[in-house]
Amino acid sequence: MSGNTIKVILADDHALFRLGVKGGLSGNRFPDIQIVGEAEYGASLFALLENTVADIVLLDILLPDISGIEVARRLRIDHPAVKILAISSENSTETVRALLEIGIDGFISKRQGNPDELADAIRSIMNGLEYFGSDISAIIYKIYVSKKKTTDATPEFTEREREIIHLCSKGLLSKEIAGRLNISPRTVDCHKKNIFEKLDLHNTMEVVQYALKHGIISLE
C-alpha cells in the first residue's frame, strides 16, 4: 500500500458495473481508495498487473475468458502480495468453498453490496482481516457445519473389522488373530490396513483407543 492510499484494480466484464463501482468509491467520501486499473477479462487483468502496482483486486467470478476461481488461484501463485476481494452474483456453496480453499481475503455478493460496505471490506482486508458479506457468511457457516458433521461421523466397519479391532484390544498379534478367526495373517493385515485408512490412524494402539472412546468395542 503506497502511503495511505489503497490501490485497487477492478476486474469485471460489465462496463456499467465498473462505472457504478468507480462512481460509488469516488469523491471525498473515500479519499483513501483509488481505482488504478480496470480489466474486462482474466487475461487483461494479468497483463495489467505486469505494469500496475495494486494492493487489492476486486474480482468478478464470472469472467468471459477465465473463470474467476482460476484467476484467484493464479493470483495467489503469481501475485501473492495482492489481496483478493470477490464481488459476484455467483455465490453457490461450491463456488464459495472453492474460493475459501484458495484463500481469498473476502467476498461480497453483488445482490447485497453497496459502496459503504465495499469500502469497509477493502479497508478491513488491507488491515489484515477477512471480510465476508452477511449472505456469504451464512454459506460459510453451512460449509463449516457440513464439514464438522463429516469429520465427527464415526466410520462404518464391517463385522470382520470389528472382530479384529476387538481381538487387537486383547493384545493379540496378527498371527494369533488369524488363528482365532480361521483366516490367514495376510488377510488380517489387509483388514488392519483398511481400518487404519478409515480412521486416518497409523498403529493398533491408536485404533483400540479410538474404538473404546466411540463405543465400537468395550472391554470385557
Image (tube, rainbow, N blue to C red):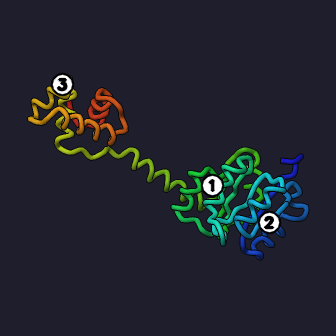
Residue visible at 70% across and 50% down in the picture = 78
C-alpha distance separating marks 2 and 3: 68 Å
Q: Residues within 10 Å of mark 3 (few under 14, many from 20)?
A: some
Above or below, 157 relative to 52? above
Amino acid type, mark 1? Arg
Q: SS class of the residue under badge 2?
A: strand
- Left or right: 41 with respect to 201? right
Closer to the chain start, of discs 1 and 2, is: 2
Circle 2: is it few (<14), some (14-19), or many (20+) Cα within 10 Å? many
Which one is in front, 120 or 93?
Answer: 93
Query: Sequence order check: which comes first, mark 1 or mark 3?
Result: 1
**Quarter-wise, where is residue 25 in the image?**
bottom right
Location of residue 29 (image quadrant): bottom right
Is residue 210 placed above or below 110 in the rendered structure? Answer: above
Mark toward the start of the polypeptide (2 vs 3): 2
Q: Which residue is mark 2?
A: 38
Q: CA distance from mark 1 to mark 2?
A: 19 Å
Decide: few, some or many residues near mark 1? Use Cα within 10 Å; few <14, some 14-19, many ≥20. some
Residue designated by label 3:
172
Q: Give residue 41's mark.
A: none
In the rendered image, which residue does mark 1 sit on? 73
Q: Nearer the viewer, residue 37 or 156?
A: 37
How many marks on residues? Answer: 3
Name the amino acid type tagged 2. Answer: Glu
- Residue extending farthest to the bottom is 16
